[in-house]
Image (tube, grey):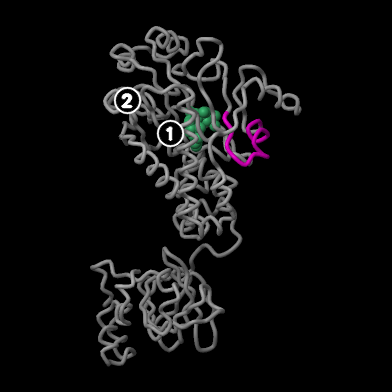
Amino acid sequence: MTQRMIQNKTDLLRTSSEKQATAGINPVAARADAPSSIDLSEGKKIFIKDLLDGEHAGQRASILGWVWRRRQHANAQFIVLRDSTGVMQTVVPIAVTAQPLYIESAVEVVGTIVKDDRAPGGYEIRADKAVVIGQSHEYPISKNFSSDFLLDVRHLWNRSSKIKNVMIVRERVLEGARNWFRSKDWHEVNPPIISGSTAEGGATLFELDYFGKKGYLSQSAQLYLESLIFPLEKVWSLTPSFRAEKSRTSRHLMEFWHLEGEVAWLDFEGILKVEEQLLASTLHHVAETAPAELKAIGRDAEDLLRINPPFKRVHYEEVLRRVNSAGMDMRPGDDLSTEHERFLTIEEKSPVFVVEYPKAVKPFYAKIDPDRPELVYSADMLAPEGYGEISTGGQREEDLEAIVERINAEGFNIDNYSWYLDLRKYGSVPHSGFGFGIDRIVRWVTKRETILDTIPYPRTLTRIYP
Ligand code: ATP
Ligand code: MG
C-alpha cells in the first residue's frame, strides 16, 4: 500500500458502514446490518502484508481472507487469517461473531491493529466485527495426509503455503526469463499446440482424431520456432508440451511447460552462452524478487546468486568413463539415465553441460560435427545437486540433403515434413536453439522431491483429476 493511500485511518476502512463508524457511529451497531456492505467494486481490498509494515499500529482496518489457524478460548477465538500476501492474527471475541469460524471459512474481520510480539508478523487485529462471507464446514485437509490424498484434493491443497510459495517462485522464474528475452530483443511467439508433424516422435506422442486425420499434441515447438527465425531472427515461446511418458519418475510430467528459443546466425558455442546467460539471469531474478518464499521453502537465495556463466562442461565420453568406473552400467550410445545424471551432479553447485553426444542419442535435426561426423552439436544442461536434465540445446542441421537423410533414417514420413524442408530450401542459415523444462527448473530451485509439486495440477500416468 502506498503512503498516499493510508494518510488517515479511514483509508483502512473499506465498507461504507465502517466509514460511518469512524464518523461517530457505533461500529458494533453498524455491524449488525452490514454483512454484505464491502465495497468490492474498486479493488480496494486491504492486503495483509501492507498491514504488517509496522506503520499501522492503533489504526482500524477491515481485512478479507480465509481462516488459516484457529484456537478457541473461553471468550474469544484466536484466528490467524491468510490472504494471498501473508497471515495475520486476529482476536475475535465470541460476542462479535454471528457464526462460528472454521478452517478455510472466508471472512471479513474489522478491528484495531495492535502491536503484539507474540503474533506472527508482530501485529494482530483486535476485532469488533467478524462476518462469515463463505462458510467452510469440515475442511478435509488438516494434518498428516498421504501424498496421494493430497493429489486427490489438489484443488484445496493448492491453498497450502507449501504450494503457494512454489507457485510464486515459478511465476518469478517465468518473469525472469521473459525479462531476459526482452532485454536482448528476442521476440515472443505463439506456435501451435496441435500439429500433424512431430519433433521428438515415437512412443511419447499423444495422438488425437483431427476431423478424421491424425493430429498430435505438441511435444516441442521447435520446428515451428525454426520457421519463425526467418521473419524474426530471435524467437522464443512458452507453451505446454505433451509427452506420454510411460515410466513414472520424479522428473516427468505428461504436460509440462516448455521454454524454447531459436535463433538465426548463431552456432553451437553461441547457443550455450545464451542458455547460460538466460538461466543465470532468471535465477538472479528469482533470488531478488522472492526471497521470503525461497527462505520458507528452504532454498538459500545465495545459492541462486552464485550461479554465473560459464558452466562446467563434461564430454559424453568422459561421462561414460566416470559412470562405469563408479560401478554403474552405461554403454556407448546410451542416453544418460536419471541415476547417471544424479551421480554426475550431486556434488555440483552450478549447472553442468554434457557435450559431444554421439549422433544416435539425438534427434534428426541436431547438426553433425563436420570434423567428427559421429558426434552432434547438442548439449544437455544438468541442474546441480542431483536434479538432472533441465534443457537440451544445440545447433540445427541447416543442409537440405543431410536433414532429409536423417528424417528417413528415423523412419518418419517425409511427407509430413515438406513444409519444414522448405526452410532448408529457401534461404537456409546456420541456426541454433534450446528447450528448458520450466517445471524441472522449479523443482531444482525449490528442492522438491517430485516434479508433481512444481505445478498446480500435475498430469501423470494415473491422474487427470482434478
Ligand atoms: P528426458 O530425457 O529427461 O526425458 P528429453 O531429453 O526427452 O528429457 P527434451 O526433448 O530434451 O527432453 O526436452 C527439453 C526439456 O524439456 C528437457 O530438458 C526437460 O527440461 C523438459 N522435459 C522434457 N520432457 C519432460 C517431461 N516429461 N516432464 C517435464 N519436463 C520435461
Ligand atoms: Mg533432452
The residue lying at 75 percent from left, 28 percent from top is 326
The range drawn in magenta is 340-353
Q: Decide which of 280, 433 is in the foreground and name it.
A: 280
Q: Position of residue 215 (x, y in %)?
A: 34, 26
Q: Disc 2 versus disc 1: distance between alpha carbons?
A: 23 Å
From the viewer's perspective, tell me whether residue 195 is left or right of residue 385.
left
47 or 98, nearer to the observer = 47
Please state which of residues 381 and 337 is positioned toward the viewer in this rendering. 381
Q: Give me the disc on residue 242.
A: 1
Please indicate, yes or no, whether residue 244 appears anywhere in the rendered image: no
What residue is at 59 percent from the left and 23 percent from the top? 335
Q: Is mark 2 within 8 Å of ligand 1?
A: no
Identify the element where label 1 is drawn.
Answer: strand
Q: Residue at x 42, y 14 (%)?
A: 412
Q: Is residue 50 left or right of residue 369?
A: left
Residue 317 is inside the magenta segment:
no
Corner quadrant of residue 308: top right
